[in-house]
Amino acid sequence: MTYENISVEQRGRVGWITLDRPRALNALDSALVDELARAVAAFDEDEGVGCIVLTGSERAFAAGADITEMSEKSARDMLMANPFAGMESVARARTPIVAAVAGYALGGGCELAMTCDIILAADTATFGQPEINLGVIPGLGGTQRLTRAIGPYKAAELILTGRMMDAAEAERAGLVSRVVPAADLLDEAAALAETIAGKSLPVVYAAKEAVRAAQETTLAEGMRFEKQTFAALFALDDQKEGMAAFRAKRAPEFRHR
Ligand code: CO8
């Protein structure tokens, strides 16, 4: 597959997707989002890939949806032909996705990072939902995912004012799992992704799905889902291997698939 707005590479069991539209700070236009959706789907279908890293440039992970492309659209255009439908397929991926964020992650860029499972931030990262300054509100999950991630009061402040937060504040707020020096971001993301990709793939899928369920269901439903999934994993060779390895005091050798 050829891409114009992203670059794609597989290193071992990790799939790398780099947003590469520097002239617009990786702003998400429909062409970029389509390519991103295709690349994620291709890695997601490949059992040789156990984790995906999504990153941008040193200056910007993504500075939002493309304002130039959007500015003249009508309400009808936006309702009838969602140009960002591809974001939903990123959100649906079974494979865990690590967002490695340096520079701006604003608007749709922050929302794209929140579509991923883990957000690792360089100390240069800046997060925000500045749509209010454009006369709109977040439209790709910002009002929902940011609110669940950092709580309603801080999310309201950011969404109502358009204020940006730096990496340290984002980590304190719980949006970011870890902040690392910018120069180490890709190495840290690689190490994290390789660790995940070294686990049993069906168990990783199950763990991701269960954590996602916590965002979408009630506690009672989520607990039921977890209990069923936990029990079902005892049908896998990898459960037998993981527990046998523990008892034999050796490292497990998961079959991965
Ligand atoms: N869209 C299009 N072009 C952009 C965007 C963007 N979001 N962000 C930056 N660019 C372009 C600039 O226009 C500029 O282009 P040019 O050189 O041709 O003038 C180039 O990138 C470099 O940007 P700046 O010169 O502005 O760089 P600065 O370092 O001065 O500023 C900022 C960097 C602060 C990131 C600034 O560019 C900025 O504020 N960008 C816009 C951020 C923003 O408002 N993002 C939210 C967009 S709206 C959104 O994401 C809603 C998504 C919901 C969609 C729902 C659909 C159903």
Image: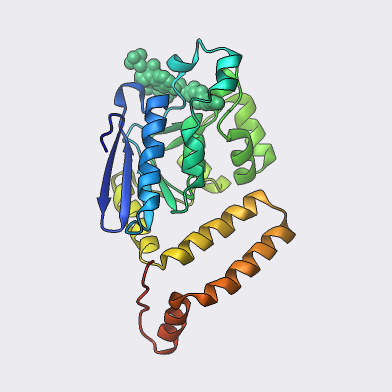
| Colour style of the rendered protein structure | rainbow
Q: Residue at x 30, y 48 (%)?
A: 186
Camera-side residue: 158 or 253? 253
Q: Position of residue 71 (x, y in %)?
A: 50, 13
Which quadrant does ligand 1 occupy? top left
Camera-side residue: 148 or 82? 82
Instruction: Indicate the quadrant where residue 1 lies.
Output: top left
Residue lying farthest to the top in this orientation: 72
Camera-side residue: 105 or 40? 40
From the viewer's perspective, tell me whether residue 38 is left or right of residue 82: left
Number of numbered markers:
0
| Residue 29 in sight | no
Q: Position of residue 87 (x, y in %)?
A: 48, 36
Q: Residue at x 47, y 48 (%)?
A: 93
From the viewer's perspective, tell me whether residue 150 is left or right of residue 191: right
Instruction: Please say if 204 is above or below 70.
Output: below
Instruction: Indicate the quadrant where residue 102 lies.
Output: top left
Instruction: Please say if 148 is above or below 80.
Output: below
Split into 4 quadrants, where in the image is the C terminus?
bottom left
Q: Position of residue 168 (x, y in %)?
A: 48, 44
Residue lying farthest to the bottom in this orientation: 248
From the viewer's perspective, tell me whether residue 79 is left or right of residue 184: right
Instruction: Please say if 111 is above or below 67.
Output: below
| Residue 139 in sight | yes
Q: Position of residue 206 (x, y in %)?
A: 52, 62
Q: Residue at x 31, y 47 (%)?
A: 16
